[in-house]
Amino acid sequence: MKHCKSENGNEFVSIIVPFRNESENILACLKSLSGQNYPKNKFEIIFVNDSSDDDSLQKLLNTGKEENVIVLNIPDEFIENSNKKRAVKFGIEKSMGEIIVTTDADCVHSKNWLYSLLQCMDKQTGFVSGPVVFEEDSSLFSKLQKLEFAGLVLTGAGLIGINKPAICNAANIAYRKKIFYEVNGFNDKNKLSSGDDEILMQKIWGKTKYKIKFCPDKEALVKTSSNKSLSQFYHQRKRWASKGLFYGSKLLVLKLIAIYLFYIGLILQLALGIKSSNNFFILFFISICLKFILEYKILKRGKELFSLKSLMKFFTFAEILQIPYIIIAGFTGIMGNFEWKQRKIKR
């Protein structure tokens, strides 16, 4: 992977961190952001409280903050389901930066994270997607999540590399404030509970002449906790799937539907092989081999960036488990109605 090089350094940067009920993580996030190897007079950190009902806001307020750290509460008025997007938008409205960087309150960052991410933000670039990785523990569940999530991030990087940006993660993105307003921000998708990352990136790509880039620098890597339970994992992926049919590009929506039908087809091939003809088993074997080969190549490209070497032995197991979860989460996500940050969200 090629690394970015940029002349950026004169523009003021606003890091926006929306948070809701992040008592366990908020201070570690604050510490990693405050400790950035970047001039203090060139960036600000804006934490935006999204109606937390735990003590995460109080923890922030009770901590001796740097002068460039700001803590805000969003107004009571908001569009139904806008949730995180209203927090990000409010942070942007109150920001001084020409460049907006967003991350999540359950993330930690290396001291060179901001500098490395902004190396991709040259004058021709409007949006930068950075790498995000799940931290693993001793459990098999966390290892499988790290491997599978790395595949998603690397797929997004590859699509950006061929100038077909589709997926990214709001835990590590940067964009120009003037372009945010130029493409009308989140205003046309406010009723979606997510989309503050991918849909915005797609709009910038489709409506402006600015470049979209992925930052492949290990220093730009953001670490976040994996889901602690199967229920959390399910609701996370259900929420991610909920925005798929609302992408601006109809061609991209058709491609996503085709991918989903491919997964449905795998199950049908097995069923028909049992009930009808062995030829369907052959078709299933060919299809699953193609899936394994393509996705193994993707993970191999990012093995060093995401430290996946010790996890590749779980690849086959992760690939098999991915099939039912994509089918279930994809269907239920489009139907809506899921939980996120102790909220019940309806379509």
Image (spheres, rainbow, N blue to C red):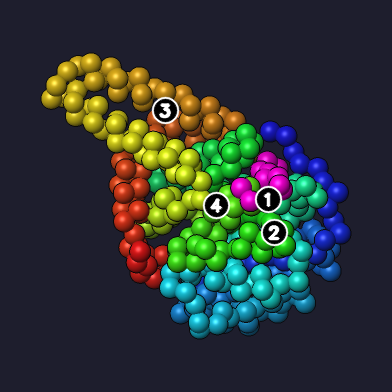
Q: Which residues are magenta?
A: 206-222
Q: Which residue is mark 1?
A: 208
SS label for mark 1:
loop
Secondary structure under the numbered disc 4 in the rendered image? helix
Q: Position of residue 17 (x, y in %)?
A: 61, 67
Q: Nearer the viewer, mark 4 or mark 3?
A: 4
Q: Is residue 165 visible?
A: yes
- Residue 214 part of the magenta segment: yes
**Which numbered marker is on residue 218?**
none
Q: Earlier in the sequence, mark 1 or mark 2?
A: 2
Asked whether, in this view, residue 302 is left or right of residue 114, the answer is: left
Task: Count the numbered circles shown.
Answer: 4
Which numbered disc, 4 or 3, marks the residue that appears first in the sequence?
4
Q: Earlier in the sequence, mark 1 or mark 3?
A: 1
276 lies above or below 268: above
Q: Which of pointers 1 and 2 indicates the residue nearer the eye?
A: 1
> Looking at the picture, how far across and down is residue 251, in whole percent?
48, 40
Give the residue pinned by disc 4.
Answer: 198
- Tell which of 322 and 74 is nearer to you: 74
Q: Secondary structure at mark 3?
A: helix
User: What separation in Å lies between label 1 and label 4 (alpha carbons)?
Assistant: 15 Å
Asked if residue 26 shows in the view, the reply is no
Residue drawn at (48%, 26%), measured in percent from left and top? 294
Spatial separation of the CA atoms under disc 3 and disc 2:
37 Å
Q: CA distance from mark 1 to mark 2?
A: 8 Å
> Which residue type does callout 4 highlight?
Glu
Q: Does 9 appear in magenta? A: no
Q: Nearer the viewer, mark 1 or mark 4?
A: 1
Q: Are the two marked residues, 1 and 2, in contact with CB atoms closer than 8 angstroms? A: yes
Q: Are marks 4 and 3 in contact (CB under 8 Å)?
A: no
Q: Which residue is mark 2?
A: 179
